[in-house]
Image (cartoon, coloured by chain):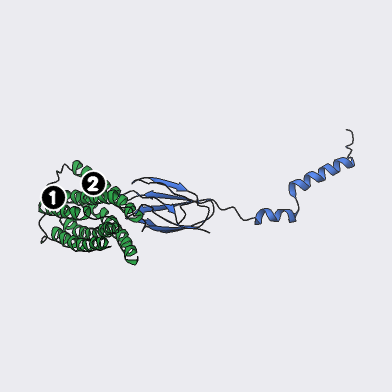
Amino acid sequence: MKNKTTMLTRGALLLGVSAFLYAGAFAQEAPKLTDPEIAHIAVTANQIDVNYAGIAKATSKNKDVLHFAETMERDHGGTIKQAEALAKKLNVTPKDNAMSKSLMEGAAKETKALKALKGAAFDKAYIDNEVAYHKAVLDAIKTALIPQTQNSELKGLLEAVLPVVETHLGHAEMIQKKFAAK
Amino acid sequence: MSPVTVKPLHLLALASLLFVACGTPEEKAPATTVPAKPVAKSVAVSIAQMKFQPDTVRIHPGDTIVWTNNDVVDHDATAFPDSAWTSGTLHPGDSWRFVPQASTPYFCSIHVVMKGAVIVE
């Protein structure tokens, strides 16, 4: 019981950490971004969520969590392929930048925290993190990435991905409410 | 010229032919009042921006619905809640034709918050 309480407390702390990390990673006083940098951020943000899904699939036994993780892996994995194909077509090499690095650093901390959890505590922390992450990504796409993208095809892909991220957020919030009602 | 003889049997045959060809007014009426059988039609549902568009489709028995995935991610159309029918995975650009036999809500089993309905009138 004590162990379970400790795990849940860790999970709650994780949510606070997640929100802080993502707010910090994306809200960097609207840095000037080039299209190669935006392409790199898009691929990085998708890859981070694919990685989280991999942890969930290896750790969780909850069917809602597993189904959500499979959807994240499928959708974000597909988006990475489309972004890479578009970058190749446009002859753009995604370029590492401060926002991508910040995202990776945040993801490393989050991954470590998630891997320390099991059972219901993991499920709650994973879903809470997905809610926070998708909110932050959504905000970044709307306020930083789309407005600064110069190439119309890259901008089009980001605009097409927006409702996907919104739907993921709705899906994660639905599971979050289900957990809260238990 | 020999006279034409009309036997009673011939008259009966002639009367029968006229009866079949013309019919009676009472027999003609049903042929014109039977309602024409509705022609089965095809209705398109586009899957785009994470929505079924339109989300509710009203059809008649025998009509076909064609779902087309115009989105950037995979989707499906699956009867809810019993999964009595499903399109299977529709990759971007894929289409699926189906003739629903009964009204039912449906959803995307990949993105469970995406919902639609088929109403067979």
Position of the C terminus of chain A, as image quadrant, is bottom left
B42, A49: nearer the viewer: A49
Q: Position of residue A161 (x, y in %)?
A: 26, 53
Residue B23 visible in this rendered orientation of the protein = yes
- Indicate the amino acid at tag 2: Ile
Q: Position of residue B59 (x, y in %)?
A: 50, 56
Which residue has dot 1 on it? A37
Same chain, labels 2 and 1: yes
Residue A75 visible in this rendered orientation of the protein = no
Disc ID at residue B116: none
Left or right of A152 on screen, residue B56: right
Which residue has dot 2 on it? A80
Q: How many marks?
A: 2
Please tell me which residue is depicted at 56% across the width and 53% down the height of the picture.
B38
Left or right of A157 on screen, residue B82: right
What secondary structure is marked by label 1?
helix
Q: Which chain is green?
A: A
Q: Quadrant of residue A166?
A: bottom left
